[in-house]
Image (tube, grey):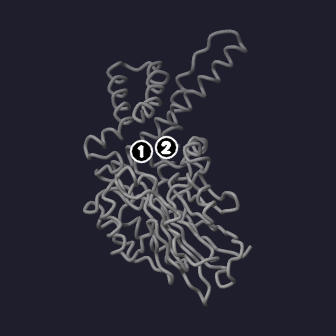
Amino acid sequence: MFHFFVAIPCLIVIARYLAPLHWPLWVKIPLSALLLLISQHHLMTYLAFGSMFSPEVPRIMVLAINWLFGAMIFLAVLQLLVDLGTAILMVIKRRRLAIPALLRYAIGAIALAMAAFAVNQAVRVPPMKEVEIAIAELPAQFDGYQIIHLTDLHISRLFETPWVDAVVAKTNALAPDLIVITGDLIDGDLEARRADVAPLQALSAPDGIYASPGNHEYYFGYEQWMAHYQSLGMQTLANQHAVINRDGADLVLAGITDLRAPRTGWPAPDVEVALAGAPANAPIILLDHQPFEAVSAAAAGVDVQLSGHTHGGMIWGFDRIVARANNGFVSGMYDVEGMALYVNNGTGLWPGFALRLGKPSELTRITLRQK
């Protein structure tokens, strides 16, 4: 179904954009075939590498494929808008109208430019975003406490060592009290990504670096990756918690497994298990890769949930579809039955859809405040 869905923009472009152009068939047919291949690049990746989440090809190819894929999507949308506008004019003028070739060339150029910009926005080192979260009964010792929230780094052939180095340097320069990563750190097997994840070992914060798993950890050897994260100096939280103490006051940091976990034989996410034995009355921050079950976390007494997974919806307008698939949560701050839910747009994103328009990546600095 997914592969059929992503073929629809391609079919629109072929039928409504290419076909009416006065170009020879020897140009139109190969170009249509190329567009079909681009639309199915996820399937090609799966057939070639056994997973559509980790294209093991040179970075320049990943960038080019995303640029062409994005241009195809934007061109399909622009062509439909032109068709709609033409249809309205035909009704008003009561005569048949042809779409000028010059207009077709113009929207083609616009689509290519939009896609180039969207890819650039997707792969840049993310800007820092400031967020304040007020917590009822937060001990005074934690008022002003700063957390860097990273998520969805998707370290891969798209986000390689130089990008990871830059993210680590930018994070450390902010001198946070704590660094948390809410899953999907990687795309690829350990041996393929070992060098690219190595810079994460340089992350530094007085109260440590904590990571919870995302769905992509379960695609590429969950046990190996979780052990490797720990070897890089991170403490992993999978249905577990840690207690951060500051001058006699406690803050509970919990992390749970991903909703994908049971499909691969690992324990399902369980907030109750994660909080077992936690000090009573201490504020609770939960790391949960997906925001889908935020209501359950609120019912369990969590004060703040930090999530990712949605990539913020990636493109303005498309974010509404992503929200529907994530129980209405897609980007930014939500009040969920008194619990603060923050959904991070993502530090990186999946290399199979490396496009951002109006939904920028972020390196998020969260400051805790007393309510």
Q: Amino acid at mark 1?
A: Asn
| In this view, 141 is above or below 211 | below
Circle 1 is placed at which residue position? 66
Element under disc 2 = helix
| Residue that appears at 51% across and 31% down | 76
Q: Residue at x 56, y 21 (%)?
A: 100
Q: Name the side, left or right, on which 316 lies relative to 309.
A: right
Q: Position of residue 43 (x, y in %)?
A: 33, 38
SS label for mark 1 = helix
Task: Indicate which disc, 2 or 1, sits on the residue closer to the N terminus.
Answer: 1
Name the residue located 61 percent from the left edge and 90 percent from the top edge: 247
The residue sitting at the bottom extreme is 247
The image shows residue 90 at horizontal and vertical percentages of 67, 14
Quadrant where the image shows the N terminus: top left
* Above or below: residue 91 compared with residue 78: above
Query: Looking at the rendering, in which quadrant would you find the C terminus?
Result: bottom right
Find residue 185 and report its image quarter: bottom left
Q: In the rendering, at what x and y percent does residue 225 appear?
A: 33, 64
Measure how far apart labels 2 and 1 are at the Cα level.
Answer: 8 Å
**Dividing the picture into quarters, in which one does residue 188 lie?**
bottom left
Q: Is residue 321 above or below residue 20?
A: below
The number of discs equals: 2
Q: Position of residue 116 (x, y in %)?
A: 48, 46
